Image (cartoon, helix red, strand yellow):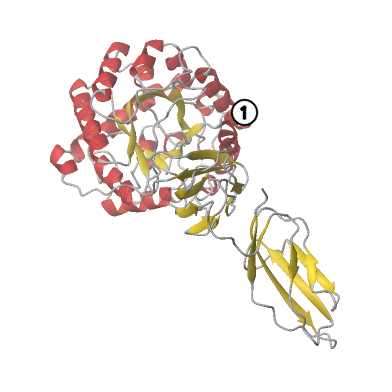
Amino acid sequence: MRHTRTARLLALNLLFLWFYTFQFPITHASVTALQLSPSTAFTLMPRNGGSNYEPLRRNLADDRLFGLNYGPFRAGQTPGGTSPTPAQIAEDVALMAQKVQVIRIYSSQGISHTIVAEAQTRGVQVIIQAWIDQNTENNQREIDAAIQLANAYPNVIAVLVGSEVLMRGDVSEAALIGYLDQVRTAVSVPVGYADDDYRWLNHPNLLAAVDWVGLDLYAFWNCLPLAQAAEYTRTQWQQVRTTAGFANKRVLVMETGWPNAGYNTACPGVAVGTEAAQAQFVSDMLPLAQTEDMDLFLFETADELWKCTYEPVVGCHWGLLKDNRTPWLGWNEVPDLSPVQLLDPAQGEIVVTAKPLLRWSAVPNAAKYTLQIDNDSDFSSPAVSATTTTVQYTPGISLPAGLYYWRVRAHWGNWSDSRSFTVDLTAAPQRNRYTTVTPTLCWNRVTWAAEYELQVDSQPAFGSPLDYSQQVAPDILCRETSALTPGKHYWRVRAKRSSGTWGGWSAVETFVIAVP
């Protein structure tokens, strides 16, 4: 039933392509003349196999991707008319960088290089696309431009060759495979194609021509109500990835969403777009995608009002941002990418265990965290790469003596700044180190003390002490704590006068619990 939008999309896409092709021609010189610097926000590792995937010639990172589909047009900007300015593109990329680690664009010509270059400065990765339709001459220009972008920009992590080409009937399967083969032989990043589940399941020959599979899944266009939309996306994604032949391919949901206005004319009382409905879809979809480890790209970043001319109301209202870049409710349902703060070990600390406890700050709404430990600061071959739902981790292997770097990211978030520590099993004995979770802490006598108060916390600010001992008798100068977690702790003590007034807190001391 999703065919209901095919004819309208064809008209829109031809105009969209005309804009990219003729308004902003791109040349090889315009790409290679750019001064590029390596991205520091993300480092993608080649997949090295696993229980669900056979080793491929190349593939995407093991970390699941969460991104936005991006079209740059604003009010008064139309294909063949006024175009987005570099400043407007920079504003858009800055907004998207607050929410996602990667964006997808639909063409590789024209202003695409401006988008990719701006994303590079923000540490945002890009999946670029060679637009493919019935214009064979322009298809080749798109392919050439995509190859240039992929080879020039290190933040281009993958290439799409066509989107819904088979759905529209623009080219044959054999021609599409020829385009895919041409790009795959010319770039080092993984190459894929995007279409709906029906097209993928009925064109199994495509699988040998792609490194990964892109799925466009819309409950809205299939006349399903909002309450079933997120589950529909999960079900169709699972159906494809568990079908014979797909098990060795990464399957990404490249488009899904719900409009903030309009309705599906095939079922006007069922699939209805409102601001609240769009927000509900995002609220339902994101936790489900995290739970399922689904690669997910929401459609789309902002409303593109020029599309209303050809597909009134619903076609131009899929954005999470309004045309003026103020948020619809759905934008606020996407959590900001809060960075993780590393806590322990401290920067440069010497640890005397081969399995040190690593701790970091919690990130709101984070379903899980990924941690890496490497003896090289570029994390090119981590000794430890692990996922956990807690904010601490102890390596399952013994680390040999030496210098190590570590970092953490919340799921779909940015990597933290890295820290280093040194494993030295022969280091000199350390003071204030306990092998029990209930250490005994002692302090000196204060002659006027009527009682003492003791606080122990894992944070130096003592915002929520883990151990809080009040009314400690003046003749007691040591106190066994309650059970604490392994790691670094802070403690302090103060004395109370018989008049009821308190003296000042002692200097903050630290101790470490390292249970064998």
Frontmost residue, 19 versus 442:
442
- The part of the image, by quadrant, that contains residue 435 is bottom right
Q: Is residue 385 above or below residue 194?
A: below
Frontmost residue, 331 versus 414:
414
What crowding class fits label 1: few (fewer than 14 Cα within 10 Å), some (14-19), or many (20 or more)? few
Q: Is residue 307 above or below residue 76?
A: above
Frontmost residue, 415 versus 107:
415
- The part of the image, by quadrant, that contains residue 311 is top left
Say what secondary structure mark 1 lies in.
Answer: helix
Mark 1 belongs to which amino acid?
Gln
Q: Where is residue 164 shown, x and y percent of the image?
A: 37, 23
Q: Is residue 25 above or below residue 453?
A: above
Q: Is residue 480 left or right of residue 165?
A: right
Q: Where is residue 145 shown, x and y percent of the image?
A: 21, 33
- Residue 359 visible within the image: yes
Q: Where is residue 353 shown, x and y percent of the image?
A: 57, 50
Q: Which residue in the protein does label 1 denote?
A: 228
Frontmost residue, 9 versus 396:
396
x 72%, y 54%: residue: 436
